[in-house]
Amino acid sequence: MKPILVVDDDPQMRDALREAIQRLGYEATVAENGQDALGKMAGTPFAMIITDMKMPRMDGLTFLKEVRRRVGNLPVLVITGYGTVENAVETMKEGATDYLMKPFSFDKLNGKISSIMEASAADREIITGNPKMVRLLQITRDVAAGDTTVLIYGESGTGKELIARYIHSQSLRKSKPFVAVNCAAIPEHLMESELFGHEKGSFTGATDKKPGKFELANDGTILLDEIGEMPMGLQAKLLRVLQEREIDRIGGKHTIPINTRVLATTNRDLRKEATEGNFREDLYYRLSVFPLHVPPLRERPEDISPLSEYFVRKFSALLNKEVKGLTGDALNFLLRNQWRGNIRELENALHRAVLLSRGKLIDISDFMLDEPPPELKTGISPDNSNRGIKEMERDLIMKTLRDVNGNKTKAAKILGVNVRTIRNKLSEYGKNFPDEQ
């Protein structure tokens, strides 16, 4: 796995960033400034770069421009001081993947790193051998060449955001920002500011000017993820942005022109939602200039085996384990599963299995956290195999909780289960971790 390059003139910050990166399972290389970093890049390929803005000898913006000239699309996360909004906007225009404003929490940093690394892997390859998906990718490459608005629809967990990133990576805007906005995760009262930005003092709590996501994505691509969750009142404002190609910051005196390609995803039937009055019909037609349907995993059985091999390699490297693949029984179990949660469910299952595995091959028992698969419910002696499985399960849960300082929500996410399962298991074990705040 390629290391992450950290560029910062503050030795304490360098050490803190390196430690955070290593906790995520990645290697880190540090540099004191832009020139030092360029020298290290000459001999080592990196997975991504994290750089401060203000540094001696070569500042972050100059360094970013040089990285773009030399390496092209290498992901770059820029760290900038609070109040330097203009710098953040400028770095995005110069091709920064994302930015992080000081002061920041390490949870926020971890989220940015994980998101960028996963997106970078997605840009490199989409794993499929299914005829429907192969045809979809052919169409995607054709539509990527233009600036057409694309609506990508399908069930949750099928890889809609992956397709959106692929469109951007194949487009003429690929060296410019790709900004994803999760419409389902942003509170309604904050969404307008998040999308269009605000001026200082425009509302209580607006202590500084803030650019919106459309502004940050200027000359690049914005993804409106799960657009069906957007409130009706904001849909009208979005429609105007799409029609006029300009935005109004909250509290702003002038409109700001934008040149941003818009992609959107949804797991809803927006045509039906529009007919029933739950989504603006005019916005639906504006978004669905070119609709793309991503089929569920149960309609793509050819993809289960290669996807499983990819996830085994990914989590084996991330967790510093030597798992090489799956037994025949384990693969047959995966092939027979319906995967209602699609690729996301498969990924969680394999993450869990790699954690549980004690050998070089994942066996069917490594998938068990709650109930055993039907084919294993007979023939297991309560005095041997089942006891070993329960012990592995307990060890996995306790280790994961220790790794996240007892945070049951984080542990549940890593293990691919809900928080209630974690609490029930702890009660069963007679163990107690304080509830997270």
Image: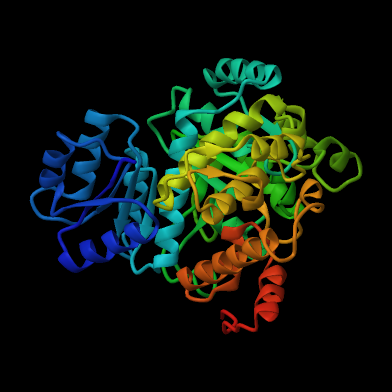
Question: Which residue sits at x=75%, y=60%?
Answer: 381
Residue 26 placement, left or right of 201: left
Q: Quadrant of residue 203?
A: bottom right
How far across and how far down the image is residue 58, in percent?
12, 47
Residue 110 placement, left or right of 374: left
How far across and how far down the image is residue 53, in percent?
24, 54
Total marks drawn?
A: 0
How far across and how far down the image is residue 202, in percent?
52, 67
Question: Which residue sits at x=42%, y=59%?
Answer: 110
Q: Residue furthest left?
A: 57
Along the viewing direction, whichever of 437 and 310 lies nearer the viewer: 310
Residue 275 placement, left or right of 205: right
Coloring scheme used: rainbow
Placement of the C terminus among the 4 image quadrants: bottom right
Q: Is residue 336 visible?
A: yes
Along the viewing direction, whichever of 99 and 27 lies nearer the viewer: 27
Q: Is residue 298 above or below residue 14?
A: above
Question: Which residue sits at x=67%, y=62%?
Answer: 384
Along the viewing direction, whichever of 380 and 280 lies nearer the viewer: 380
Q: Residue furthest right?
A: 276
Question: Which residue sits at x=52%, y=29%?
Answer: 166
Q: Quadrant of residue 63?
A: top left
Along the viewing direction, whichever of 192 and 243 lies nearer the viewer: 192
Q: Is residue 183 visible?
A: no
Q: Is residue 380 above or below residue 167?
A: below
Placement of the N terminus among the 4 image quadrants: top left
